[in-house]
Each structure stands twice: as structure tokens, then as C-alpha cells.
Amino acid sequence: MKILTTLSLRLRIFLFFALLAVCGVGVVLAGLAIGYIRAQASGPASGFVFAGVLSGFGLLALTAGIWFLFDENVARPIERLATGLRSRAHAGVGGVDKHAARYLGDLAPAAEAVSEQLMKTTMDQASIVASETARLSADKARLTALLSEIPVAMILVNPAHQIVLYDKQAAGVLSQVCPPRLNASIFDYFQKGPFLAAHKKMISTGLEQSFTDLAAANGLEFDARLKPLGPGEGYLVIIDDAHTNIAPDQSRPVVFDFDLMEGQATDNLMDMHLNDLTYVVFDTETTGLLPHKDEVVQIGAVRVVKGKIVPGETINQLVDPGINIPAASTKVHGVTNAMVAGQPGIAVAGKHLHDFARGSVLVAHNAPFDMAFLRRHAKDCGVDWTHPILDTVLLSAVLFGTTEVHTLDALCERLGVTIPDDLRHTALGDAHATAEVLCKMLALLHSRGIETLAGAIAEAKKHKRLLNDLN
């Protein structure tokens, strides 16, 4: 077999066809010979029929065998080689599996050379970016320290009325209405009528406008001001602390993404570019594997905006299942009966996740399992789970083929994502790992020409035999 690794790819493919031809001729000759012998005993007609049937089945078996060799040694290695190169080019992970491609002649070394050169160029660029990143990190730290000392809550909003920045005081105020979220509509937190009236006056006069607002939920009332930034540049919402209830331990950094300043309408998520969508990647831990009778004991969720995980915007919530947690389940996820005692039930925790995911695409690994629990309790939560859903199992099948393993561990290994041992099989740990996987997958989907949510869902549905599609 060693000599085969020295042959060129063209010669190896020629040998496949030559083997097919030689063996095919041999099968036909063997069939004729056996048919001739049978003809002497049973007559010419019987001999010819037997020879034809035997030759036909022999050719089918030969074709299947040659196809298996070709698929195992040429077709599948080429597919894996292409996937590895695409992963290296667009996600910065993976590479050339030289062992799998050992029968592809010079193709594997050539691909590895290109891959190494690409990585070297990337590393050179990364060193330049690193120095700029360090400077920006220092600027962010100064901005955080500055805004943390200002005794008002501040929210930066883009022209499309989506949140671009909020400080720790604003996080405390917003959380009393709905979980604070980048790229969320400001009207998730304020009454639209009074707010737009003040906004219209601010635009027409170019001056700061004050108003008193009854929040969109919970009856929270506070004084607010709208301050213009400039034509087409959005505005600041400043909330005075006189009527707010900011917890003294609400110590959160400034959360922002200035890429969101150029806001866009989010009425039709299906037509939006994958990188422009907001995702809530979540996971649940449960008392067992039967969604019709088991219960949720923990919910973890992470938000991804503009293809990046948003630090601080997470859910890590223990849930009282109302039933005993079996010891076998505790051994997997580590959640005990004592830990969930006094925690909110699924009605509260599920509603919190629903609020956290407003206007977002839900993402999970093996989503039908997790969604079955949520949808079963939708009435108790007072919500409808109408979000679009992406499943990383199906996206893995789209990107890497159905013959590969699609477990979360396999995906993390394939895409260079590390799950700390103490976080594996915890809701937040698995949700964070799935979010990292998703961010790398978005680049790979783009490389395959899959640009929109509708396109991603359509491709995923081609592999729905692996899992039930929920859209």
C-alpha cells in the first residue's frame, strides 16, 4: 500500500478505471465460461441466460466495490480536504488531514503549503491588530471608569431606535423592565407614544428634550432626557436617578458595540444577512430525557450580535422543577435538589428567557429537545415561541456533511473551541460553547454562499432527517 502514496492523483484515478475495465472483462468472461458449461448440460438458451444474469450481478458487485474504494480513498478525502481548507480560511481553525489525504498525491502537500502561508499571513496581520486592540482596550477601560462615576443612567441609541451602548446604571434601570440587550428596540423599555413625541420635538428643534415616562412594563416611572448627537447620528437617553431603583451592587461594565450605529430595520429577519442578525444561543439542563414528563432545572443563554458574543449579556438561571432530580441526572449536570430549592419555576424562568430573546434568532444544539420543554410550558409562561430557530447539529451537517459526527464535543474539536471540564454539561457552559461554534459557522456559511437566515434554514431543512426542523 505504501507505493500507492507515491502515485499521482491522475494516475490513481486512471488505475480505478483500469481496474474497473479489467475486472469487468474478467467477470463477463467468467460468466460466459460458466454459461458455456451450463449450456452443455441444459441447452444453449439456459446457458446464455445464466451467463447474462451471472455477468450482470458480477458487474454490479464490481461497480459497488470500486465505488467504495474510490469514495473512501479519493472522493471523501477531497471533501474533507476542502472542508479543512474552508475552516482554516474563514474560521481560523482546522487544516489539512494528511493521513486522510495520503492517496491524493501532491494535492495534500500543496494544500498544506497554501494553508500554512495563509496562516502566516494571518498571524502577521494579527500582530498588527493586537497592538491596536490593546490601545482600544485601554480606551474602553477609561470610558467604563468615567461613565461608572456619572450619577445618571445613559443609553446610546442609533437612528433606528436600537440600543448601541448602556452603562451600569442604565443596566440596573432597564433590567427592571426587561433584560438589557444591545441591538434591542428602545421601545421594549419605554412607552412608544410619549417617547416618539419627545424624539420628534428633539429632531425638529435640535435641542435636548425632557419628559416623564411610564415604562413599557412594571409601572416604573422616571424622568428622562433625549439628547441629540447630530444629524443622522442617533441620540442619548439620559435617565435621572431620582425616580429609579438602581441596586447598589449593580456593578456592570459599559456594554457597547459602535458597529450598531448604522441600524437597520428588523421587521423581516428571514431576509437579513446572517452577520446582521441577533442570536440568543441557549441550553437547558433537565431532570431527564423525556420532554413530555421531565422538567428543566437550569437555563443558560448567551447573546450574539454582529457575529460576536456580547460580554455580560447572559442568563445563568437555576430552575425549580417541582419534582425530584434523579441522582443519575445530577451526576451529568451537577444540579441538586438543594440547589434549586427556592429558585423560580419554569413559568418565571421561561418568560425571562423569552424577554431576553425578543427580536432574536434562537440557536441551540439539538434544538427540538430544548424547545419541547419550553413549548410545553408556553402557556404557563404566557408567551408564544415564534422565534426563528437554527440548530447547530443541522448547520454542522450543511458544512461538514452527514457522514461526520455532529455532537457538540466533536464540533468544538473541529472548530477549535474549548469547553472547560467544569463547565461541560452546565447550561451556561454548553450555551457559551455553542455560541462560539455558531460564530465560526457564520463565516463558513458565508464561504459557501449562504448569506441570509432564509438561506441557512433552507439548507438545514435538507438534513431534517437528522432532527425535526422547528421553523
Image: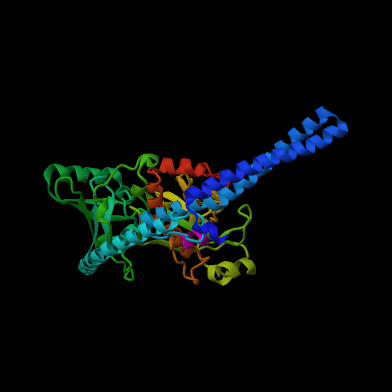
Please provide percent x and percent y for residue 144.
24, 67
Q: Nearer the viewer, residue 334 or 198?
A: 334
Please provide percent x and percent y for residue 461.
51, 42
At 52% from the left and 60% from the top, the residue drawn is 410
Please provide percent x and percent y for residue 65.
64, 47
At 33% from the left and 60% from the top, the residue drawn is 117
At 42% from the left and 40% from the top, the residue drawn is 454
Q: Is residue 412 magenta?
A: yes
Q: Nearer the viewer, residue 107 or 466?
A: 107
Left or right: residue 220 compared with residue 287: left
Examine the rendered structure and indicate whether residue 270 appears above or below residue 7.
above
Q: Nearer the viewer, residue 34 or 471?
A: 34
Q: Is residue 290 magenta?
A: no
Colour pattern: rainbow
Examine the rendered structure and indicate whether residue 131 appears above or below residue 67.
below
**Magenta stretch bounds:** 409-414
What secondary structure predominates along the stretch shown in magenta? helix
Residue 185 visible: yes
Q: Nearer the viewer, residue 78 or 288?
A: 78
Please provide percent x and percent y for residue 175.
35, 59
Instruction: Work out which residue is located at the far top of the displayed protein and give it.
Output: 45
